[in-house]
Amino acid sequence: GAGVSQSPSNKVTEKGKDVELRCDPISGHTALYWYRQSLGQGLEFLIYFQGNSAPDKSGLPSDRFSAERTGGSVSTLTIQRTQQEDSAVYLCASSGGTGGMQPQHFGDGTRLSIL
Amino acid sequence: GNSVTQMEGPVTLSEEAFLTINCTYTATGYPSLFWYVQYPGEGLQLLLKATKADDKGSNKGFEATYRKETTSFHLEKGSVQVSDSAVYFCALIDTSYGKLTFGQGTILTVHP
């Protein structure tokens, strides 16, 4: 597609449930990033993919969070046993390269609300 | 580790006023620097960037100069418009693999 696509745009779920968030990067972009935007914490890096591998998972806040990428394209961020502090906007970005030479293009995000 | 500090907001200006949003950074090596903007109800968009010292990024009337000696990348615009109302984020990339580190964001509101 023309841009990074994320789904769902909004998700409301009960505490303790699992959720899956999807990201479709721009076609041909090899680098994919997940970030989280929450009140009080700002924008935080979660995980970085180059192709299907994740060289940097250092931003994942706990072992309840995991992510995968298949076919060098679509990525899924999974949060197990959700907690209220997981409420945030989850942003995905893709880039045609790493480093500072290629800009990251962001999706509109998934707004996750944990009741 | 890397960090980015932006001036505290929110910032409220009248149309045609001069805008400065301060940004300073701490990083090893020579990062690339960015300003991203988030308009109400929209996603993050790249506003401008600079990849080396003394570079000036510019777009839509906004400018920022990469100052290595003061580790700063202040955003400026000579005459703001109501349509510039948004949240502005300063960010840097560690050139080793592209992870963005963001400042806390500055809310700008421009009144007619």
Image (cartoon, rainbow, N blue to C red):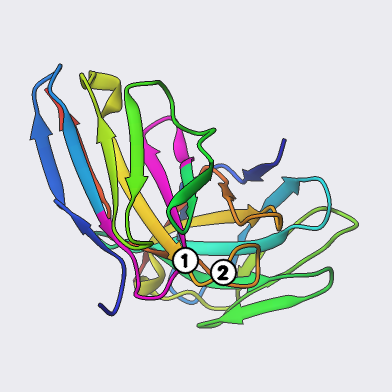
Q: Quadrant of residue A56?
A: top right
Q: Is residue A101 left or right of residue B16?
A: right
Q: Residue furthest right?
A: B69
Question: What segment is highlighted magenta in the picture?
Answer: A23-46
Q: Residues within 10 Å of mark 2 (few under 14, many from 20)?
A: some
Where is residue A71 drawn, in percent x and y?
33, 61
Identify the residue position indicated by label 1 in the image: A30
Residue sitting at x 38%, y 64%: B85
Residue sitting at x 30%, y 21%: A85
Q: Quadrant of residue B40?
A: bottom left
Count the marks: how many? 2
Q: Quadrant of residue B95?
A: bottom right
SS type, badge 1 = loop
Q: Chain of mark 2?
A: A
The answer to whether residue B40 of the structure is visible from this angle is: yes
Amino acid type for the residue under numbered disc 2: Gly
Residue A103, compared with residue A34, is above or below; it is: below
Q: Chain of mark 1?
A: A
Residue sitting at x 21%, y 22%: A82
Instruction: Kindly indicate whether the residue at mark 2 contacts the one at mark 1 (C-beta within 8 angstroms).
Output: yes
Identify the residue position indicated by label 2 in the image: A97
